[in-house]
Image: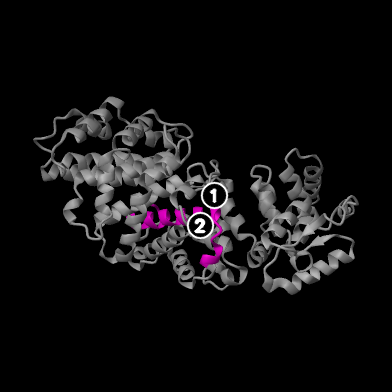
């Protein structure tokens, strides 16, 4: 009832006489705070009940609010501040409760915001003001904060679930704000200790906005290519984000939910870093920079918000060697951290842990599972039955089991499950999915099952190879041993110390084309 009244009042236009009175302002702030708490902390209340309360507004009322924001000549009009509170809570609700289908009012709000605020000259003007190394506090008017903080947050929450359609592409939006965004982060990451709360709010939502764009359609690399047009820009931006992540006073303010700017900016920066390591060949940059490793590890140790811990572990698991990852303080807690969330998500009716979908957890664990000590931890905790149980519903689990099946103890656990072995044999022989057949064959091969069926093809000649071995030169001795053993058993093997002629890259490219297995 109160919520409907507030939207009605905001959309009515009859507020000039009282909106600047302190007790009315206190009332609006109190109701907004109550609504935010309802969104973030009351999981026992059904989603449709929350939606009925928080989205009890008509398109006409929202249109009237936008009209009043556009028409006011006072950039610090209290009406803009109060309206922003309600739009921010709407965005928070959509972010924490991604709908299976779009709410009409959400479409209306964000289509208007995109066309009339994000893709307009005034938005770029505000970005240019933020691009200056010294910013007067007077820049942060209510209208400026509405454009940069509230509108950016709204579009971030709107595109993040990938359930909404907008009339432009992610790479077009990235191109629209790219230059100013990169400059803003590059300049202000060097002076984090001097940030005002208003600058922090703007930085948080800009980084979140770009992070959301980078993950929009998670299978596409195009946004990253548009955002970072040179390798040097990639490395510079990593260092910029790490400077923000490593600012320890932010760590002290982090919450267990994404309820303040300090928590949100950490989550947003990690979103971008995770997308970068997934799409670009930059592991060496992280491996060679101890300060980056330490900054991420320290953040992971103190994170109360599980999404931050998940991102930290995912990034480090993706880029670090087994020895580097195992040497970090957080290494011992990784297994327990993941399996606690995985098991709760698996048994949740919506297949999620808090707001983290199980697919996200499985991808995070997959990034870690290549490491020997994680494999052994998984074996010691006897978690293979959990993965087998999930395998029918989530195909990525088969890929994970393939990686885990190189561990001796896990091999024993898999062999002790004849029904799963039978399922693998069926997939290897009957699946219509070529990649699934390959994975099933790979697991069975590691378990030393059906080796007799993997005969050596006889149709090769001296210009073709069964296997190409690609390796780091520090592992040359081991690779020579592999080469000797394989050739002794009749395989034709391409390896650079035996078959390299002429141009190195050309020779390797030809070898890939002429080899059955890489």
For disc 2, the marked residue is 310
Farthest residue in the top direction? Answer: 60
Depth check, front residue: 430 or 374 = 430
Depth check, front residue: 251 or 281 = 281
Image position of 328 with respect to 203: above or below:
below
Query: Magenta region, mostly helix, strand or loop?
Result: helix
CB within 8 Å, label 2 to label 1:
yes
Image position of 283 with respect to 8: above or below:
below
Q: Is residue 157 left or right of residue 85?
A: right
Q: Which secondary structure, mark 2?
A: helix
Depth check, front residue: 108 or 302 = 108
Residue 178 x/y as whole percent: 38, 49
Q: Determine the residue positioned at 86% across, 57% down.
A: 462
Q: Is residue 358 left or right of residue 435?
A: left
Q: Residues within 10 Å of mark 1 (few under 14, many from 20)?
A: some
Image position of 36 with respect to 62: above or below:
below
Magenta part of the protein: which range?
A: 257-286
Give the mark nearest the N terminus, 2 or 1. Answer: 2
For disc 1, the marked residue is 360
In the picture, residue 38 is in which quadrant? Answer: top left
């Amino acid at each position: 009832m109160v919520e409907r009244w507030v939207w009605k009042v905001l959309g009515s236009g009859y507020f000039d006489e009282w909106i600047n009175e302190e007790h009315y302002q206190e009332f609006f702030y109190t109701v907004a705070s109550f609504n935010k708490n309802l969104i973030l902390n009351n999981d026992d209340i059904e989603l449709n009940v929350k939606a009925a309360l928080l989205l009890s507004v008509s398109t006409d009322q929202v249109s009237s609010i936008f009209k009043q924001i556009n028409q006011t000549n006072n950039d610090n009009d209290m009406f803009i501040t109060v309206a922003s509170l309600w739009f921010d809570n709407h965005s928070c609700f959509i972010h924490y409760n991604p709908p299976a289908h779009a709410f009409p009012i959400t479409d209306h709000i964000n289509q208007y915001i995109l066309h009339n605020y994000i893709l307009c000259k005034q938005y770029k003007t505000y970005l240019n003001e933020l691009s200056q190394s010294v910013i007067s506090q007077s820049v942060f008017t209510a209208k400026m904060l509405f454009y940069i903080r509230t509108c950016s947050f709204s579009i971030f929450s709107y595109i993040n679930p990938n359930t909404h359609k907008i009339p432009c592409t992610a790479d077009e939006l990235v191109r629209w704000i790219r230059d100013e965004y990169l400059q803003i982060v590059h300049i202000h990451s060097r002076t984090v200790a001097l940030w005002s709360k208003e600058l922090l709010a703007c930085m948080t939502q800009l980084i979140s906005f770009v992070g959301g764009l980078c993950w929009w359609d998670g299978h596409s690399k195009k946004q990253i290519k548009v955002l970072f047009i040179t390798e040097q820009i990639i490395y510079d931006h990593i260092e910029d984000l790490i400077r923000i992540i490593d600012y320890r006073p932010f760590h002290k303010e982090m919450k267990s939910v994404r309820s303040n700017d300090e928590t949100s900016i950490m989550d947003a920066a990690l979103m971008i870093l995770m997308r970068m390591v997934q799409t670009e060949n930059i592991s060496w940059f992280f491996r060679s920079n101890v300060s980056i490793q330490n900054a991420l590890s320290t953040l992971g140790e103190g994170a109360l918000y599980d999404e931050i811990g998940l991102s930290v572990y995912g990034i480090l698991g993706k880029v670090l060697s087994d020895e580097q990852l195992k040497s970090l303080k957080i290494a011992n807690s990784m297994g327990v951290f993941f399996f606690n969330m995985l098991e709760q998500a698996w048994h949740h009716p919506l297949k999620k842990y808090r707001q983290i979908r199980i697919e996200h957890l499985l991808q995070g664990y997959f990034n870690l599972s290549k490491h020997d000590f994680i494999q052994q931890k998984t074996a010691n905790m006897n978690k293979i039955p959990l993965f087998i149980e999930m395998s029918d519903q989530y195909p990525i689990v088969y890929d994970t089991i393939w990686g885990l099946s190189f561990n001796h103890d896990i091999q024993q656990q898999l062999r002790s499950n004849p029904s799963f072995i039978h399922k693998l044999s069926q997939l290897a022989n009957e699946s219509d999915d070529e990649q699934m057949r390959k994975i099933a064959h790979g697991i069975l091969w590691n378990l030393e099952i059906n080796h007799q069926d993997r005969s050596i093809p006889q149709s090769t000649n001296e210009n073709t190879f069964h296997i190409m071995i690609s390796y780091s030169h520090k592992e040359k001795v081991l690779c020579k041993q592999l080469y000797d053993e394989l050739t002794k058993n009749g395989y034709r093997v391409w390896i650079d110390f035996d078959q390299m002629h002429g141009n190195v890259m050309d020779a390797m490219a030809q070898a890939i084309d002429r080899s059955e297995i890489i």
